[in-house]
Amino acid sequence: MVNLPEVTIRDLAGSGVHFGHKISRWNAKMAPYIYGVHQENRIHIIDLRKTLPLLQVAMKALYEVASQGGRILFVGTKFQALDIIASEAVRCGQYYVNYRWLGGMLTNWGTVSSSIKTLIQYEKILNDENSVLTKKELGNIEKKRQKLDKALGGIREMGAIPDILFIIDTNKEHIAVKEAKKLGIPIVAVLDTNSDPDDITYPMPGNDDSRKSIELYCRLAADFILTGIESSLARSGVKVGDIKGDEFI
C-alpha cells in the first residue's frame, strides 16, 4: 500500500492559493470554481473546496505516470516560477522548460533533438584540452552553447516527447498547451481566475502568480512523482535508500 503525500485546504489557504485576479480580468469559464469576491481588493476568491479534490486527482495522475516510468515535463517561464520549476523538476528527476517555450518544442521534436545534439557537440569542443581553435572561436561557440543551454538544458536528457505536462500559467504557456493538445499529451495545470480550462486534462484552480502558491504546487508535484518512482522501484524489488542521488534520475 503506497502512502501518497497529503495536502489539506489549510495548506492551500496558507499558501494563498485562493487569491484570484481582479474581477475585471476573469474568464467566465472559471465561474464554477469561484467562491466570491473580496470586496476591498475586488479580486475573485477561488473555492478551495473545489480546488482540493481536483488537485488530488491531478497529483494522482502525475504519480501514475511516474510509477510507470513515464516522462514528465514541468513548464513555467514566468519570473515568479522559473527557478522553482527548475529546482523541483530536478529534485524528482524530471524535465523542465523555464526560459522560453520554443515553437515546435513538442510538435517538431526531431528539430529540437538536433539542437540538443548541437549543444552536446559544443560542450565537447569546449572541453577538448587539445583544441586548435582560437580564443575568439571558442568564445563564439561558448555564446552559442549558453543560448542553447538556456532554452534546452532542462530537456537535454528527455530523449522523447513527454508523457504528461505540468504547467504553471496556461495563458503564458498557451503554445505548450496547443502543442500538447495536438499530440494528445495530457496536461496538469494551475488555472487562475483569468484562465481557460478548455483543453486542460487535469485542472487545478488556484493562484498562479504568487511564489508561495507556485512553490506549493511544484513541491507537491515533485513529491507525488517521487512517490510514484519509489513505487515503481519497490515493484522491482529495489529499495530507494540503496540508490545514490545521481542514480535516481
Image: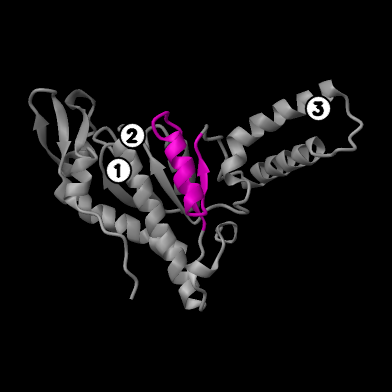
Residue 106 drawn at (x, y percent): 55, 45
Which image quarter: residue 198? top left
> Which residue lies under the disc numbered 1?
197
Which image quarter: residue 46? top left
> Which residue lies under the disc numbered 2?
211
Residue 11 highlighted magenta (yes or no): no
Q: Secondary structure at mark 1?
A: loop
Residue at (69, 40) in percent of width and height: 115
- Tell me the magenta residue range: 71-98
Identity, as a three-letter code, of the amino acid under mark 2: Arg
- Rendered image coloring scheme: one colour
Which image quarter: residue 205? top left
Residue at (66, 30) in percent of width and height: 146
Q: Is residue 4 above or below residue 123?
A: below
Distance of label 2 from label 3 (alpha carbons): 38 Å
Query: In front here: 31 or 122?
Result: 122
Residue at (17, 48) in percent of width and height: 10
Identity, as a three-letter code, of the amino acid under mark 3: Leu
Q: Which mark is residue 138?
A: 3
